[in-house]
């Protein structure tokens, strides 16, 4: 346990949350627009009787969803034990946000800085007619796409590269634009094409820029091996358009074993 101001004994908690990002301007609290973090912190404040600051593993953009975002915060277990807190949160949060798991973490755990890898999935609906029931969670593209070519192109992303050609706003990035991708797969599941990208970190709208470029490959607008040229060019103007947000999901955050450990 860690001692907070006022003599309160606090424990670091680790939560896994899922949310439909359609109604939010992203995860991170902002000056204007409702965010997932604001919703969560408002409910925690209501339960704690004071401000509770949370730390998310990733900053999802407006309209992007999460299946397994990891969030951490400090909590006084004397006020409410872990399982009771999880039930209370799910009872007070809006229906588009849910706390899937909640557990005690080791002292000093930081959901963002302890993260090692992040896995994103993008869903493309590829058929003749759009599905009104999946419009909020997929990108509809008419016309059969060349999945084989997309797979060949996706493999070019694997490794450590400068991703300047896939940074929507290079001026936004304050550090190096070199990132490592350890997996980039394209799967065909019925009328859906799913693109999974796993990396150590991502630039602003980087995954959506990668998807937009892979879609151009699938539509025959550019060759699969053009990805290598794009990476070398570092020129965003040469890459494909940014895919819309509603098809993107943060699936899972991976941690080193020591950082991931939870306390019974």
Image: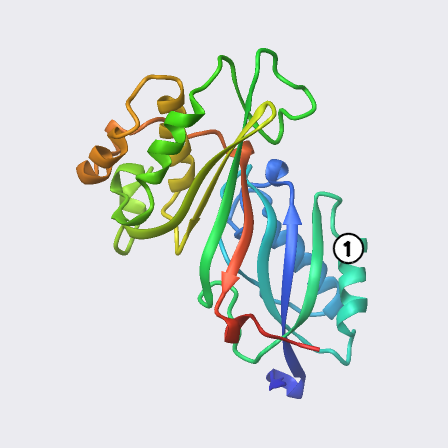
Q: How many marks are shown on the rendered structure?
A: 1
The one nearer the camera, 240 or 73, is: 240
Identify the image quadrant of the C terminus: bottom right
Quick one: SS at disc 1? helix
From what the image shows, is residue 129 above or below residue 73?
A: above
Identify the image quadrant of the N terminus: bottom right
Q: Residues within 10 Å of mark 1 (few under 14, many from 20)?
A: some
Residue 129 occupies which quadrant of the picture? top right
The one nearer the camera, 172 or 111, is: 111
> Which residue sits at x=58%, y=59%?
70
> Which residue sits at x=49%, y=49%?
119
Q: Position of residue 73 (x, y in %)?
A: 60, 69
> Which residue sits at x=68%, y=57%?
42
Q: Position of residue 192 (x, y in %)?
A: 57, 27
Residue 15 occupies which quadrant of the picture? bottom right
Q: Position of residue 23 (x, y in %)?
A: 63, 37
Dot 1 corresponds to which residue? Answer: 90
The reply, left or right, for residue 76 in relation to residue 254 is: right
Q: Position of residue 100 (x, y in %)?
A: 71, 56
The reply, left or right, for residue 208 in relation to residue 107 is: left
From what the image shows, is residue 73 above or below residue 243?
A: below
From what the image shows, is residue 71 above or below residue 63?
A: below
Residue 223 occupies which quadrant of the picture? top left
The reply to whether residue 260 is visible in this rendering is yes
The one nearer the camera, 124 or 247, is: 124
The reply, left or right, for residue 186 in relation to residue 168 is: right
The reply to whether residue 59 is visible in this rendering is no
């Amino acid at each position: 346990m860690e001692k907070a101001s006022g003599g309160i004994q606090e424990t670091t908690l680790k939560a896994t949350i899922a949310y439909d990002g359609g109604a939010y301007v992203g995860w991170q609290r902002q000056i204007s627009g409702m965010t997932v973090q604001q919703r969560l912190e408002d409910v925690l404040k209501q339960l704690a009787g004071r401000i509770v600051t949370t730390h998310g593993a990733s900053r999802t953009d407006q309209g992007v969803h999460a299946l397994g975002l990891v969030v951490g915060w400090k909590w006084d277990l004397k006020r409410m034990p872990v399982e009771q807190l999880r039930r209370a949160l799910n009872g007070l949060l809006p229906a588009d946000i849910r706390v899937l798991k909640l557990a005690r973490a080791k002292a000093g755990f930081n959901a963002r800085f302890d993260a090692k890898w992040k896995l994103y999935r993008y869903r493309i609906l590829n058929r003749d007619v759009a599905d009104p029931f999946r419009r909020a969670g997929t990108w509809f593209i008419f016309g059969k796409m060349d999945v084989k070519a997309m797979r060949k192109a996706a493999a070019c992303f694997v490794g450590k590269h400068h991703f300047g050609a896939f940074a929507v706003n290079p001026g936004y990035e304050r550090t190096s634009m070199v990132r490592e991708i350890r997996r980039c797969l394209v799967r065909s599941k019925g009328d859906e094409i799913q693109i999974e990208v796993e990396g150590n970190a991502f630039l602003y709208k980087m995954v959506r820029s990668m998807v937009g470029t892979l879609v151009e490959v699938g539509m025959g607008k550019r060759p699969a091996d053009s990805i290598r040229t794009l990476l070398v060019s570092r020129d965003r103007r040469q890459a494909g358009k940014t895919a819309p947000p509603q098809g993107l999901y943060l699936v899972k955050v991976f941690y080193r074993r020591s950082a991931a450990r939870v306390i019974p």
